Image (cartoon, rainbow, N blue to C red):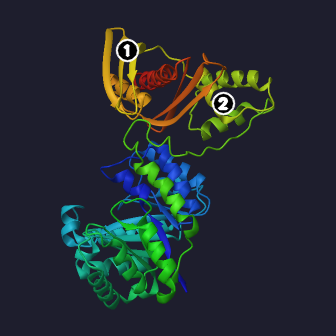
Amino acid sequence: MNKVSICDSTVRKLTTGRNNTLSFKEKLEVAKLLDRLCVDVIELDEIRNSKVDSLLIKSVASAVKTSTIAVPVALGKDPAATASALSEAASFRLQVVAPGSSVRAEYVYHKKPAAILEMVKETVSACRKYTDDVELIIDDATRGDPAVMSDLINTAVETGASLVTLSDDAGEMLAEEFAAFLEERLAADPALKDIRWGVSCSDEMSMADACAIAALCHGAKEIKAGAFPVNTASLENVCRVIAVKGESFGVRTNVATSSMKRIVDRISRFCAGGTAGSTVAGFTGGVESTDDRLTEHDTKEAVEAVASKLGYILSDEDSESVYEAFLKLASKKESVSTKELDAIIATYAMQVPEKYRLEDYIANTGNLITSMAHVKLGTKDGDIEGVSLGDGPIDAAFLAIEQITGRHYDLDDFQIKAITEGKEAAAETIVKLRAQGKVYSGRGLSTDIIGASIRAYLNAVNKVIFEEEEA
């Protein structure tokens, strides 16, 4: 039987779509789960913000062990930065997207088909300098001009593309109509028979799964799908059909169907589980973390390396302060965990003047009401108050602070632990925010968990704002 590759588009589509619900850390965790599921290819979005997007690609490339990481390169752009970000990946693919119709070429890309063809040739050739795995994705292929698509396919094959993907962006075809379209293309473009080709189907009419299976029956070697509904074929449904009926049309996959339900459920909790869109979204979904143990014999460079894995970029001054505090703690115990290093960084790195300070807060919650928080912050110009509803009192308080400051930052991590015992136990809270690809941490300490959380969040916010205003 022929092996068909499964390419998951969840992370890319939740990055570019209007309903973007994934934070930086959640994208990383979803990619790791897809890797455990043994999908062949994981798609990420192209580099738009060089610092933030490159950091995400580098992080995913380092975390994913077996899946290929695929990232688009815009037509006419140098793929060097993308290839550099992917350099630590076990394997990677560069994608080139081109319009299949002259109308889309002129009105979306603002180029004539001849100019698009030349750009495809140049971009594919440039990508081939970095990898043999180069994919041409023909946008809106089902409504494309046959002559334009033939030129694109022939050019891609001649230039060295290893895969051509026909994209049905309209999603208005029944499975039989899509099969007929593929038959026409295979007859018109013999070059497709000498190369791997695949499909990407929109799910506008809930026909993406059926169209994807129809493509497999006609020789497609790769299917784009989503572990979470992102207007494409369902990863779970397509793989289930292949597991049950694949033998009848001669295909199989490497996807771990025995783990499918459990892993897809976890991915769904990250993407849309009850907290989707809230400030603390994703942190009830079982985020996995690695723990690099450090000892007093480790050098400052080793500590900086672990801090970098956690997402911190420490200045020379902060690095000295953190290392000094680390040595004091390490001398008293066998090893220091990454969570303990997190707390050290939150306490000793980048201490800044308070732009906002906590004056008062009130939080209401219960099983019959929506949680609400009323927060009052002090500034040099006077007090400012904010009121917000949220998914729990801590989320409501964080949203109230966002309302006051007029700023939103991705919540990268949130930790609470008791540091004393008994009814009056004190809670230590670590909040990590991500802004422009950099992590800022805050620490809060109180016998009240909500109070400790607000102080930690505010501490981190002050650090971000201080650096933004100093830039």
Question: Which of marks 1 and 2 precedes in the sequence?
Answer: 2
Camera-nearest residue between 229 and 381: 229
Give the quarter of the figure containing the C terminus.
Answer: top left
**Residue at figure coordinates x 56%, y 60% from the top left:** 35
Residue, disc 1: 377
Q: Position of residue 112 (x, y in %)?
A: 21, 68
Camera-nearest residue between 314 and 221: 221
**335 left or right, relative to 285:** right
Camera-nearest residue between 301 and 15: 15
In front of the other: label 2 or label 1? 1
Is residue 176 at all visible to an observer of this figure? yes
Is residue 160 at all visible to an observer of this figure? no
Q: Secondary structure at mark 2?
A: helix
Residue, disc 2: 341
Q: Could you tell me if the residues under marks 2 and 1 are in contact, i.e. CB atoms within 8 Å?
A: no
Against 296, residue 242 (above or below) is below
- Within the image, what quadrant is residue 137 found in? bottom left
- Within the image, what quadrant is residue 378 found in? top left
**Circle 1: residue type:** Leu
**87 left or right, relative to 471:** right
Residue ranking furthest to the front: 368
Against 337, residue 144 (above or below) is below
Give the quarter of the figure containing the N terminus.
Answer: bottom right
**Circle 2: residue type:** Leu
